[in-house]
């Protein structure tokens, strides 16, 4: 005898957890949004929903009335005593009037041809880098005129997107075809933002090549084995190619990129404004307090620190953000950005510190770097070989490498009981002893 499944909607199909449904406030039945013409992102604006049958009796659905311009719930009654919340209309207006530190204090302008491994060996990677033109960067982006409908063509109309409702600071789901329809319509009732479309495994990947220096620095390219079996539980992380699609007045609140990754960020169309806070120990502690605060949405983090810098990134420019820099982003005009994240050997200690901070904040797995501990184990093997090679020929290892491995080995000791993330073939105790042995040699040389 077949299992009885309760049926819903005008289509009389059973409940499907992956499909958006809305409940009629009159008959209490549930309906697929696709069957009754309601998109998921529209649902939060509905005060009372009537299904097609009930609409004939009680009239059409009613929408929430706007009662304020400064709270995430715009239907909330307010006597003027409630604070302005992040992303709202009044917040954006206030943000435009704030005073910030000069970008010259926080950002280094360089030519693309100068961004080499040797540059980072000599100068480190402690401040954001701004490259005015793509010349010498060896970056590939689509031809001018490429726009959102083209993104849809290459990633697929049914690709599900994580979308941020800026005024509410809420996450919603949309299909790529819905996003294109929204973005290309000049009349928009909402301010929506897409900042997490990773497209490495789509046809669009062939149109975008990351800057050459990113390929040279990125651990994912150098430390992750190419011969792992297909059934390995450890899957190579793909975080190097993101497409960010933002309409004017989008705002992303202060954050640190996952796992302490560094960022490459090319403004293909439009313009972006960054608000930077340096990751000093004091600022990171304040950031921790701010994220944990119950009134986080009412506090502009830049007001909590001594220095917050405003940096404008124009169309055609490329930005490199180093490990740990706390930043918010405002979009003054419709924009299309290509960017990505990468781990590297120049800020290992701070990368690990940011990962630790994520664990303290109980950051959900979906917002963390995939297989973070695993890639650090692979990096430890790679860097050990590098350190050995330098010392075997009588060379003096660079300080960033020695310091980075000193920091890394302390974390590896803490991770030895996280068995799932330790790659097959790596013997944690033996690896840690070998690293310590080489570090002792390095101390003698230095």
Image (cartoon, rainbow, N blue to C red):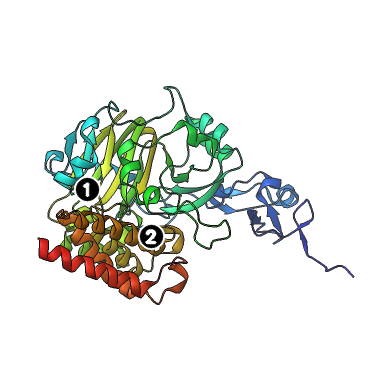
Name the residue: 41% across, 63% down. 374
| Residue 97 visible in the displayed image | no
Q: Is residue 104 left or right of residue 389?
A: left
Compared to residue 293, the image places residue 260 above or below, namely above
Q: Secondary structure at mark 2?
A: helix
Q: Where is residue 115 shown, x and y percent of the image? A: 23, 36
Q: Residue beneath label 1, please? A: 276
Q: Nearer the viewer, mark 1 or mark 2?
A: 2
Question: Observer-nearest residue: 194 or 444?
Answer: 444
Q: Secondary structure at mark 1?
A: strand
First reached walking from the N terminus: tag 1 or tag 2: 1
Vertical side of 153 occupied by 47: above or below: below
Q: Which residue is mark 2?
A: 378
How far across and how far down the image is residue 255, in percent?
Answer: 31, 54
Query: Do residues under tags 1 and 2 come within 8 Å of each other at their CB atoms?
Result: no
Residue at x-position 55% and y-position 57%: 229
Residue 292 in percent (x, y) is at: 31, 67
């Amino acid at each position: 005898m077949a299992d009885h499944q309760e049926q819903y909607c005008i289509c009389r199909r059973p409940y499907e957890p992956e499909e958006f449904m809305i409940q009629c406030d009159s008959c209490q039945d549930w309906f697929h949004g696709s069957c009754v013409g309601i998109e998921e992102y529209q649902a939060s604006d509905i005060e009372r929903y009537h299904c097609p049958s009930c609409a004939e009796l009680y009239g059409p659905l009613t929408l929430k009335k706007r009662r304020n311009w400064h709270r995430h719930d715009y239907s909330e009654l307010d006597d003027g005593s409630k604070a302005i919340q992040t992303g709202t209309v009044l917040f954006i207006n206030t943000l435009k009037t704030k005073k910030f530190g000069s970008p010259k204090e926080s950002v280094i302008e360089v030519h693309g041809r100068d961004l080499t491994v040797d540059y980072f060996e000599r100068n480190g990677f402690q401040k954001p880098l701004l490259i005015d033109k793509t010349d010498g960067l060896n970056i590939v982006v689509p031809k001018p005129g490429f726009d959102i409908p083209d993104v849809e063509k290459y990633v697929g109309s049914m690709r599900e997107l994580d979308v941020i409702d800026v005024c509410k600071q809420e996450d919603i789901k949309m299909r790529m075809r819905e996003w294109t329809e929204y973005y290309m319509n000049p009349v928009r009732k909402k301010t929506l933002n897409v900042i997490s479309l990773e497209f490495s495994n789509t046809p669009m990947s062939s149109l975008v090549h990351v800057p050459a220096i990113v390929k040279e620095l990125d651990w994912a390219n150098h430390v992750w084995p190419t011969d792992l079996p297909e059934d390995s539980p450890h899957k190579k992380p793909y975080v190097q190619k993101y497409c960010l699609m933002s309409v004017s007045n989008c705002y992303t609140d202060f954050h640190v990129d996952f796992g302490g990754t560094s960022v490459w960020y090319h403004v293909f169309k439009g313009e972006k404004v960054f608000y930077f806070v340096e990751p000093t120990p004091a600022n990171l502690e304040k950031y921790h307090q701010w994220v944990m605060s119950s009134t986080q949405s009412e506090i502009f983090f830049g007001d909590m620190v001594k220095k917050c810098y405003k940096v404008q990134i124009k169309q055609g420019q490329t930005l490199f953000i180093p490990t740990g820099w706390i930043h918010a982003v405002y979009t003054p005009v419709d924009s299309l950005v290509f960017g990505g994240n990468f781990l590297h050997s120049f800020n290992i200690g701070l990368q690990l510190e940011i990962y630790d901070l994520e664990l303290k904040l109980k950051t959900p797995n979906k917002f963390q770097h995939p297989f973070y501990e695993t890639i650090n184990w692979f990096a430890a093997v790679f860097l050990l070989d590098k350190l050995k090679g330098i010392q075997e020929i009588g060379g003096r290892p660079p300080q960033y490498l020695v310091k980075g491995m000193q920091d890394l080995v302390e974390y590896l000791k803490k991770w030895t009981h996280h068995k799932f993330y330790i790659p097959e073939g790596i013997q944690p105790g033996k690896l840690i002893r070998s690293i310590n042995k080489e570090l002792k040699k390095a101390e003698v040389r230095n």
